[in-house]
Image (spheres, rainbow, N blue to C red):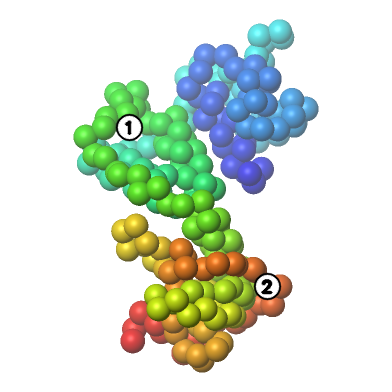
Amino acid sequence: MRRADRLFQIVGLLDCSKVVTAHTLSDALGVSVRTIYRDIQDLSLSGVPIEAETGVGYRLMKGFHLPSLMFDEEELAALMLGAKMVQAWTDKNLARSAHQALRKIENMLPEKLRPELERAELFVPDFNVDSMTQKHLGVLRVAIKKQHKVLYDYVREDGQSSSRTVLPLGLFYWGRVWTLVAWCELRDDFRHFRLDRMTSLEPLKQSFMLIEGKRLQDYLDT
């Protein structure tokens, strides 16, 4: 977690509680108590009115609140549905991030809107993305972001296997199946590959540049 994100979360936790101890903040954010002490001091120096009670904990000065996020019920329903989809159909890191994002939103919502996040009229079936596909998703997301080539063995529908080195460009979910769109060095063209047919996946140290004719947008425009 970036330090800026942690500082923001500390203020959010103080904003929704009467008094919070350094140990509680430490457990919630996964850092040491000493780090919390340093963060509290930096927030105070930055002008956030934090009051400390010896032996009790920290709280925001009475009357100080973070501005509430302004969502209507339909917007909250859309956010909740999107988060459920991420939690059900992607890798564990994205699922965890979706959960954390909802908790941040909850902390910033006006009290009367917080129950909307718990309403369950909209459901997302868990298609049980297998553990290998989840692992591949995580590796490929990082490779796409860092623009690193990847190498994997791929089994086609007819059972034939081949080794591919590709420039990963984008991930697409088609309902039960994830596919990778990539520039394939073997075919010297765009190709899409099902993640559940990759029998191995290795991120390479070799990076690549997004040049015209080999970008995701070029694929989408064809």
58 sits to left or right of 159: right
Q: Position of residue 154 (x, y in %)?
A: 52, 74
Q: Position of residue 111 (x, y in %)?
A: 34, 23
26 sits to left or right of 217: right
Binning the other alpha carbons within 10 Å of mark 1 as few (below 14), some (14 to 19) or many (20 upward) gives some
Viewer-closest of 10 and 168: 168
Residue lying at 64% horizontally and 69% vertically, measured from the top left: 203
Q: Earlier in the sequence, mark 1 or mark 2?
A: 1
Q: Position of residue 28 (x, y in %)?
A: 60, 28
Viewer-closest of 86 and 56: 86
Q: Which residue is mark 2?
A: 204
Q: Nearer the viewer, mark 1 or mark 2?
A: 2
On screen, 211 above or below 16?
A: below
Viewer-closest of 177 and 140: 177
On screen, 44 above or below 57?
A: below
Amino acid carrying label 2: it is Leu
Which of the image's four quarters has the N terminus?
Answer: top right
Binning the other alpha carbons within 10 Å of mark 2 as few (below 14), some (14 to 19) or many (20 upward) gives some
For label 2, the SS is strand
- Pick out the residue farthest to the top: 55
For label 1, the SS is helix
Q: Which residue is mark 1?
A: 117
